[in-house]
Image (tube, grey):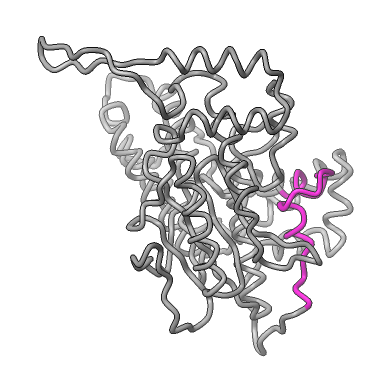
Amino acid sequence: MERILDENQPRVQAGFRKGYSTTDHIYTLNQVIEKSNEYNVPLCVGFIDYDSAFDSVEHFAIFDALRKININETYVTILENIYRNASARVHIDNLESEPFPIHRGVRQGNPISPKLFTAAIEMIFRKADLEHGLNVDGETLKNLKFADDIALVTEKVENMEEQLNVLNNISLESGLKMHKGKTKYMNNFESNKDITIEKEKVEKVESYKYLGQTTYLKDTRKEEVTCRIRAGWSCFGRNREIFLDDKLPISLKIQVYDQCVLPTMTYGCQTWSLTKASTQKLRVAQRAMERKILGIKLADRVKCSEIVHFVAKQKWKWAGHVARLKDSRWTLRVTEWQPRNGKRSRGRQARRWRDDIVKTKGNTWSRDARDRDECRRDAEGYILQWLDRAS
């Protein structure tokens, strides 16, 4: 059943699927924005927010979706029986309500629930049959989905409004309602056109947090590094009692730092366009945290995971992973994409994600990275260039 559910999901759905992660869509969206800006290609991105999506989807929509993708009727019947008898009670102090039936929402905590939900979402999109998107080497990128975290992609604001309204109407049939106040859009060109859904205006924004990373249509990387450092300090603060407790061994503090703070500060670092300034910011933040822990430079006493080394290593591993993809997913397509209908502006271009990789390996980096052994050998040279710059 799980195999059939996965086989009926498109490349744009990365939620709850083996071999996919949030990094796929974060990277894809960043590349689309980066190249659209570089080649002056018009771009409009709409971010959909459903009200309590997992708790709102109608049961009949789930079972209809399962039948349409030819899930064995025995399994569908079993699931129908489980959901048909679902009920709940409300407890307030010592009072308890009578049981009442539940006709919508997937069962929280059930291993199959996420895939049932994404099956229902996919059927909504098939019914919507969205027409507009972004032309990427002859193929149209229309949306990116991670379960209910959905980004629509078009070239015109008018097309975005049309598709949001079509999707909203069809989603309502399955019990999903767009939250008009939380659904946003952004575009990289001037437009006097406003987007409305059911006569309610959708807010245009300059940035939006998608899958945990703040997305900007302009200088995304500089802002994102600052955001990650801020998140790192927040995580540091939540573990302050551990870091500042003199009775705890240093090894434990380092373990907490490496397992909690470091991943928070470097989330999505595979997608960053690294610069000397950004790596220096990360190193300064790390050293400040080290001093907070012991009141001295922790590097003088014990070795933390060097954050610049970690970021560079993660990016190099991701580049190799993307180069070796064989399933034509959008992660690879947008990496190789060079817009033919756009033209670069004069003057110095903004730093691109691939620039530091090309500096190390040249323009044949993606071909060379398909050889895992060669990719591993080249990793040290790539990482060292950033350690030297940050030192």
Q: Is residue 29 magenta?
A: no
Quadrant for the N terminus in the image: top right
Q: Which span is picked out in magenta?
A: 319-340
Report x, y in % for residue 212.
46, 47
Residue 54 vs residue 85, the one in the foreground: 85
Q: Is residue 268 left or right of residue 293?
A: right
Report x, y in % for residue 350.
61, 75
Check the image and name the residue furthest to the bottom. 346
70 in relation to 147, above or below? above
Quadrant for the C terminus in the image: bottom right
Report x, y in % for residue 99.
27, 13
Check the image and name the residue furthest to the left. 94
Residue at 71% across, 66% down:
355
Residue 123 vs residue 15, the one in the foreground: 123
Q: Does residue 387 appear in this view?
A: no
Q: Quadrant of residue 239?
A: top left
Residue at 44% across, 34% down:
54
Residue at 58% across, 43% down:
22
Residue at 77% across, 70% down:
338
Residue 172 vs residue 243, the one in the foreground: 172
Residue 15 vs residue 294, the one in the foreground: 15
Q: Does residue 179 appear in this view?
A: yes
The mark tally for this picture is 0
56 in relation to 107, above or below? below
Report x, y in % for residue 368.
88, 51
Q: Is residue 80 left or right of residue 357?
A: left
Q: Is residue 323 magenta?
A: yes
